[in-house]
Image: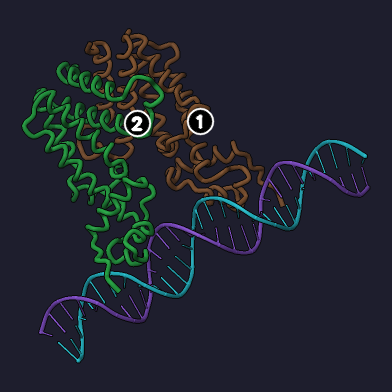
Chain colours: A green, B brown, C cyan, D purple
DNA sequence: GTGTTAGCCTAGGGGGTCTAGGTTCAGGGA
DNA sequence: TCCCTGAACCTAGACCCCCTAGGCTAACAC
């Protein structure tokens, strides 16, 4: 009988696809094993636990999102950079809802450090370079931007904006306008 | 043998407490039954399913949060109202992390309508009355505020801000300052 | 060819979800 | 008083998921 050729990488990639298809909460060791035509017990040679699997998906999503954000920022500055970064964030959430949901799992400090989870903060900080904010204002602004992007995409994905005629794209564009203005006039 | 005197209301209230204690993801029909000293099957005369239980906790949290927000807004206007509302939101999330996490479940449209989930939008809109924004700017601002409050509290609860010396309370206060300024100078 | 290792297996325990169908308790009507 | 009825709670059991222990086998090394 043929080996399935399982690898941690293949498993995690497949789990990420599974998450986008059926939702992150439904990513289960059994479902993943089924997808490979293999018994669930077999996956435990590659994975420590179901939680381990979910964390690996989160780390994958974290890295993918950071890569996209970095590309979006390349060669841009000021409002251009802000908009490109924000759109990279939102587009990723819409294309990969399962992976995006995976970002909500809290990683252990060790894993977070190893996966360079702080890349996101650094990238956000890069946007702000054009606005010349002194510390600690820059840190506060990083947190505001993060919160807003994350909150908007989360609420949008949950359908929180859907019961109003104003379309979400316009609100998003206007929100970015407003943040740009705000960063230019950050209160002392 | 004594009856436990189960009611949907008692069950949901207990489930909410359970959520705050052990996390929303660990709110299970079995655990709830155990808490009442009853077999899990017995709860299915009161609840349709585990999902039904979770939705009811979400509705409870939604209502509690809206009540707090409404009290916070009473008799306030302008920045006072903004700060009071935002703090009500954040304080609730910190006091009741399990209930707050429950808000992430997506309610079916029928349940959302029946639970007046739109009260939050209306309350947010009440804050904005002092800033005199024309439509659709007001709607966009409602969405921005919602996104920011939700995103900030979510990231804070997940420990997303914990690896930086700048304390979260100060960032929060500064974020509210910034939003106040922004609402006063909303871009055309 | 014989070991070694990694990849996959069966078996099985534990817990969560939910259904079907039974029993007991409380209150109302003949 | 006795019975009826409905509500509250039960047992039994099917199904899925998580995970461990231990066994078999294909592939590679020597």
User: What is the chain letter for disc 1?
Assistant: B
Asked if residue B59 lies left or right of residue A31, the reply is: right
Q: Which mark is residue B110?
A: 1
- Image coordinates of residue B102 in percent, x first then y, are 43, 37
Seen from the viewer's position, the closer of residues A96 and C12 is: A96
**Label 2 element class:** helix
Disc 1 + disc 2, Cβ < 8 Å: no
Whole-Å distance between the Cαs marked 1 and 2? 18 Å
For the C terminus of chain A, which image quadrant?
top left
> Does residue B152 appear in this view?
no
Query: Which residue is rendered at x = 49% and y = 32% of the image?
Result: B59
Q: Which mark is residue A155?
A: 2
For the N terminus of chain A, which image quadrant?
bottom left
Q: Which mark is residue B122?
A: none
Q: Quadrant of residue A66?
A: top left
- Image coordinates of residue B122 in percent, x first then y, are 42, 18
- Image coordinates of residue B86 in percent, x first then y, are 35, 23
Residue at the farthest front position: A1
Asked if residue B144 is positioned above or below residue A73 in the image, the reply reads above
């Amino acid at each position: 009988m043929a080996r399935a050729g399982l690898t941690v990488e293949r498993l995690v990639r497949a789990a990420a696809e599974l998450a986008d298809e059926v939702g992150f909460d439904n990513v289960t060791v059994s479902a993943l094993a089924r997808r490979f035509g293999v018994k669930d017990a077999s996956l435990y040679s590659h994975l420590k636990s179901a939680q381990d699997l979910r964390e690996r998906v989160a780390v994958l999503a974290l890295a993918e999102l950071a890569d996209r954000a970095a590309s979006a920022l390349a060669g841009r500055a000021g409002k251009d950079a802000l908009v490109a970064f924000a759109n990279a964030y939102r587009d990723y959430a819409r294309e990969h809802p399962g992976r995006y949901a995976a970002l909500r799992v809290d990683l252990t400090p060790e894993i977070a450090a190893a996966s360079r989870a702080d890349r996101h903060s650094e990238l956000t900080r890069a946007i702000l370079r054009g606005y010349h904010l002194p510390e600690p204002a820059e840190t506060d602004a990083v947190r505001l931007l993060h919160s807003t992007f994350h909150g908007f995409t989360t609420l949008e994905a949950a359908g929180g904006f859907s019961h109003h005629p104003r379309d979400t794209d316009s609100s998003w564009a206007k929100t970015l306008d407003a943040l740009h203005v705000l960063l230019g006039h950050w209160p002392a």
